[in-house]
Image (cartoon, rainbow, N blue to C red):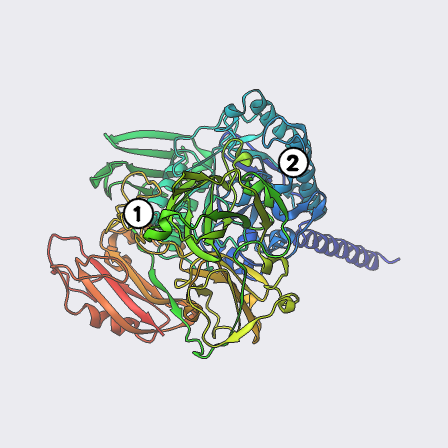
Amino acid sequence: MEEGKWKVSVWKDRLFLLFFFFFFCCCCFSVSCLGANVTYDHRSLIIDGQRKLLISASIHYPRSVPGMWPGLIQTAKEGGVDVIETYVFWNGHELSPGNYYFGGRFNLVEFVKIVQRAGMYLILRIGPFVAAEWNFGGVPVWLHYVPGTVFRTDNEPFKNHMQNFTTFIVNMMKQEKFFASQGGPIILAQIENEYGDTERVYGDGGKPYAMWAARMALSQNIGVPWIMCQQYDAPDPVINTCNSFYCDQFTPNSANKPKIWTENWPGWFKTFGSRDPHRPPEDVAFSVARFFQKGGSVHNYYMYHGGTNFDRTSGGPFITTSYDYDAPIDEYGLARLPKWGHLKELHKAIKLCEHALLHNEPTLLSLGPLQEANVYADSSGECAAFLANMDEENDKIISFRNMSYDVPAWSVSILPDCKNEAFNTAKVRSQSSVVEMVPENWNPSLQWDVFVEKAGIWGEADFIKSELVDHINTTKDTTDYLWYMTSLDVDENEEFLKSGSRPILIVASKGHAVHAFVNQELQVSASGNGLDSTFKFESPISLKAGKNEIAFLSMTVGLQNAGPFYEWVGAGFTSVQIEGFKSGTINLSSNSWVYKIGLEGEHLDIYKENGMNNVKWVSTSMPPKNQPLTWYKAIVDPPPGDEPVGLDMVHMGKGLAWLNGEAIGRYWPRTSSIHDECPQQCNYRGKFIPNKCSTGCGEPTQRWYHVPRSWFRPSGNILVIFEEKGGNPNEIKFSRRRVTNICATASEDYPIVDLESWHKDTTDLESWHKDTTENIEAKAILYLRCPNNGSISVVKFASFGTPSGTCGSYSKGECHDPTSANVVEKICLSKTDCAVALSEDNFSKDLCPGLTKKLAVEAVCH
């Protein structure tokens, strides 16, 4: 071969090999065939040799529906989140021993794939005990009835089933190549859950069980680290982590482990009959900033999207169907503003500090009795600082490196370059909104079909006993309902029959709720509450001469989900007496009691399409009001549009609801006590507790019940309601969750840094900082943006000066620029988004000299 041709041939071969190698590498990376090495040291997780500062978000796959998962994960990602965290819900997957289910809302594999496609990491909290306000803490009820089983201790039956399930999940994840060591998104896995505070209660079985759980997990060889939250004695190499409202002072149990916060609670759960708790965004941001200031490296919001306890999945007991949690993404999937936006800005600011935080040891500077700075710097000039004011009342001017910083009470200022304030946790500059449930106008002639259950034993009795049985041991949680029925003969000469007085029914119960019937008539309803599921009541009842039928519909409202030996907590009656007889008080506790598990409609599946013809429905346009034990059925159209949908049940009593056979969940518009006091204003300063910033005093804890859009068909949807004690079905309405107004504020003393462009021109960072600080007025900007590409149609409020209040209730202060509304309208009307600078071009420089001025705007989108 001629030399020139040989050279050409060789180069062709080389180009082919280079192309093939490039193509092979691209393919490998595109399908994640190359595994990531996940290790750790005292400072952080290390993924493929790189230190990582990670922001994580809890989103539980069964608490939403598959159609929502991509949107939820994308909204989290847009909020600055790197990692999705979820529990694995054992009782949702292993329905009976060895009988597994992974469909619908429990399609764990699909959920992980969506996280992977979004380019995010995943923390898989296998547990498999999860607590989580979830029914029975996530452990299958059937396991309690396996002979000799005691949960969460050194007990062989429990450990065998726990290991079998853990191994099943791990093998499923391995088969899908989901662990980071296989190229997947899972970077951490958790075994057990918050056992450290319970371990000692289990005596000699506690610590051996915890150590066994750790060894069992490590034996799974998943190639990524294991964690145990709130496990103070977690053995190496398992990492112990923190769960709390604040974890800045948490220290791992080994100097070789990083500081990880698995649960930062940005709100709190609700129980039927309680107030609605809220945690201010300023305090959430303060807790996060303090955690990273004090050396944290992995932080997770529990919850970032709480979602919904569909069907009978809520635990507690008395946990509401809503698990909204005041989270950054609300129950319906909408970003909660300003919390979501404020935390997004926080995440940006923290990420600007990532390299300095993870590669330098901090220097602590005392700047006052309750003021301090942590500085992360090296000899090359890299520097990041956190200025903290822990004073709960007083704002402070903090001097740091020859500059002054306005740091409000209970706040942290973040300086990614130790000079410019990029973010302060108390200065909320992100947009807020007014979100309302807008009712749909149903056809007034909506046709209801009605089926009324018998009050008492229907069909043949399940069994008869001369004692009061435990409710949960009888139903084994196959239903909320258990009928107790007995009879009582009343002599015609009893004095109360002649005088018109009424005897008194006295009942004591372990929980959770009851409807008491005498001769088919509802006499009284009673229940415990989220603080104490037990209850006692005394109530007059109507008895007649001769035989009286006494029937109790006992109800559970979600099983116990946590606490030592929680599986042994029972429900049902402990004592039944009637006083007012000539012979004294009659004790019925040892009477002959007839029992029936569940409702007739449940047994016949009349809430499912294939079971609806199993009873005779009565059609009527005027269904009975306040009729107990009544099933209602109607054909409904989906609400128009694409906004999330809720079912308004405020005019009903208590019961269950389904759409097209899908279980919406328990409804109970139970009101909080009128004696509760909700604060007029919430002060974010100082440590948060769940009742600090509550709303809804004297109102139903939950009025609307989420109905996912994906459950609707274009027409012919079948809505089924079971009402226990009575209500008005004509008042049932669908409502659409809609952003009605948007608001924003900006202040002259707010951080002026544009976080998006901080590192865009690193070649002249000094000039950029100089330009930033010399053009403060141009950098103080109010931003507005309409959702769903709408446009601003009305400016309802605008004031530059000293306005006060919050979104939906702004008011002008003594200092007010009368041109405020005109300025904002000129810039913002008919636009999807707009930016209004607090500059001399827009507002008077001489307005209210000596005061720090603010601009507040509320607008309507069309």
Which corner quadrant holds the C terminus?
bottom left
Q: Position of residue 630 (x, y in %)?
A: 50, 63
Amino acid of disc 1:
Cys
Q: Residues within 10 Å of mark 2 (few under 14, many from 20)?
A: many
Q: Nearer the viewer, residue 567 or 159?
A: 567
User: Secondary structure under badge 2?
Assistant: helix
Q: Residues within 10 Å of mark 1 (few under 14, many from 20)?
A: many
- Asked which quadrant contains residue 394, the reply is top left
- Residue pushed farthest top? 204
Compare marks 2 and 1 and give the one earlier in the sequence: 2
Amino acid of disc 2:
Met
For residue 761, say whether it is visible.
no
Separation of residues labelled 2 and 1 (CA atoms):
39 Å
Q: Position of residue 75 (x, y in %)?
A: 48, 57
Q: Nearer the viewer, residue 435 or 672?
A: 672
User: Which residue is the site of mark 1?
Assistant: 693
The residue under the point 33% across, 76% down is 830
Which corner quadrant holds the N terminus?
bottom right
> Which label belongs to residue 844?
none
> Which label belongs to residue 162?
2
Disc tally is 2
Q: Position of residue 412 (x, y in %)?
A: 31, 41
- Horizontal relation, residue 30 to residue 283: left or right: right
Q: Position of residue 300 (x, y in %)?
A: 47, 43
Q: Nearer the viewer, residue 354 or 411?
A: 411
- Residue pushed farthest right? 1
The residue under the point 42% across, 73% down is 440
For residue 431, say whether it is visible.
yes
Above or below, comparing residue 273 to residue 368 in the picture? below
- Residue pushed farthest front? 493
